[in-house]
Image (cartoon, helix red, strand yellow):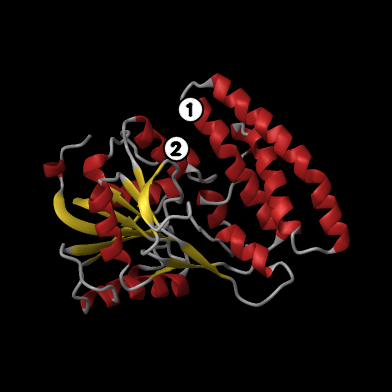
């Protein structure tokens, strides 16, 4: 593990942002409203827009903030680029990750810090509650798709890991690669899966707390069957890709076989629920496309959701 005295005993909240002014404001205000911790806190905003569109807003807020807010322009689009630059700039032992479409509850940081200390974990995760505007017949299933419910315990050590947004890292308990977030994932995502798998393979541990809740605002274009297909396919690719990165070819074969079974088992239900207009269509669609992702995990087949591709679109 990295020596604890390498870092300052403080918390740095890192928030990458990309052309989401409304989400950025909600997220940042939730950080500035946090109840006190027993450690100093600072915030780094990594603006991944080539035009630096968040600069003026961040500078105006930071001028009157009791919590230090640092603006970091990372002009080369890519989620890995933004996270690597911010992590490199941070000097703190503890890193809290919040996305620019999320809102932290008032004891978010304090509860994360308490769980990290209690379980001596490399990373701690907590629930994410999805907020989807409007209503559709798929509403309940869409909320389940985007939410993070966790392992069903209040607090404790867990074996699995979750995504980077709404998580808490103790860098003194993490062995990092030279570039923590793989730049090859700039457009496809999955950079957090690769990093957390690396940390786990080098002795890192994970924990869960039910008390550090965050909300996530789901944009309307994401709350659709089309986006579910793409997101599920990309998510399904992760276990096969992680096994391949580790040189575990029997593991790759296992996940591809599991994906084939998963796709075949759910395909009839996708067709049936689609034809009958059942809301559970979203559930079976998710399962089937995850299975297909496990089979077709190769680089050329990865959906491009972020980075340079996102920079050419109007919605993200």
Compared with 180, 60 (above or below) is below
Give the quadrant of residue 115: bottom left
Give the quadrant of residue 291: top right
**Residue 184, x across and y down, in percent:** 48, 37
Q: Relative to 188, is 195 on the left or the right?
A: left
Q: Relative to 119, is 220 on the left or the right?
A: right
How far separated are the C-alphas under marks 1 and 2?
Answer: 8 Å
Q: At 32% from the left edge and 33% from the top edge, which residue is drawn?
A: 177
**Residue 98, x across and y down, in percent:** 38, 61
User: Which residue is at the far right?
Assistant: 275
**For the residue carrying disc 2, how many other residues have a C-alpha within 10 Å: few (<14), some (14-19), or many (20+)?**
many
The answer to whether residue 199 of the structure is visible from this angle is yes
Q: Relative to 156, is 252 on the left or the right?
A: right
Q: Which residue is mark 2?
A: 194
Residue 245: mark in rendering? 1
Look at the numbered discs 1 and 2 and tell me whether their residues touch, using CB distance below 8 Å.
yes
Which quarter shows the C terminus?
bottom right
Asked which secondary structure carries label 1, the reply is helix
Which quarter shows the N terminus?
top left
Q: Earlier in the sequence, mark 1 or mark 2?
A: 2
Q: Relative to 265, is 2 on the left or the right?
A: left
**Residue 170, x across and y down, in percent:** 26, 48
Residue 117: mark in rendering? none
């Amino acid at each position: 593990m990295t020596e604890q005295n390498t870092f300052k005993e403080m918390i740095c909240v890192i928030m990458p942002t990309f052309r989401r002014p409304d989400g950025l404001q909600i997220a940042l205000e939730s950080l500035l409203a946090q109840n006190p911790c027993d450690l100093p806190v600072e915030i780094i905003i990594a603006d991944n827009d080539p035009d630096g569109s968040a600069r003026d807003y961040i500078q105006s807020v930071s001028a009157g903030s009791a919590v230090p807010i640092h603006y970091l322009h990372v002009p080369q689009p890519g989620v890995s680029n933004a996270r690597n630059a911010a992590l490199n700039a941070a000097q703190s032992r503890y890193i809290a990750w919040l996305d620019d479409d999320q809102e932290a509850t008032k004891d978010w940081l304090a509860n994360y810090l308490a769980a990290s200390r209690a379980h001596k974990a490399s990373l701690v995760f907590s629930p994410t509650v999805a907020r989807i505007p409007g209503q559709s017949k798929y509403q309940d299933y869409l909320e389940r798709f985007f939410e993070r419910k966790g392992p069903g315990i209040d607090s404790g050590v867990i074996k699995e890991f979750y995504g980077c947004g709404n998580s808490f890292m103790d860098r003194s308990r993490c062995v990092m690669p030279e570039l923590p977030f793989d730049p090859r994932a700039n457009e496809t995502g999955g950079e957090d899966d690769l990093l957390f798998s690396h940390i786990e393979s080098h002795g890192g541990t994970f924990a869960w707390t039910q008390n550090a809740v965050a909300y996530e605002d789901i944009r309307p274009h994401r709350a659709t069957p089309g986006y579910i297909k793409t997101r599920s396919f990309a998510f399904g690719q992760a276990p096969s890709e992680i096994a391949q990165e580790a040189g575990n070819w029997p593991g790759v074969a296992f996940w591809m076989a599991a994906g084939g079974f998963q796709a075949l088992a759910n395909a009839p239900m996708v067709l049936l629920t689609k034809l009958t207009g059942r809301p559970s269509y979203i559930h079976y669609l998710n399962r089937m496309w995850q299975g297909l992702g496990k089979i077709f995990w190769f680089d050329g087949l990865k959906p491009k959701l972020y980075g340079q591709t996102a920079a050419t679109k109007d919605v993200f």
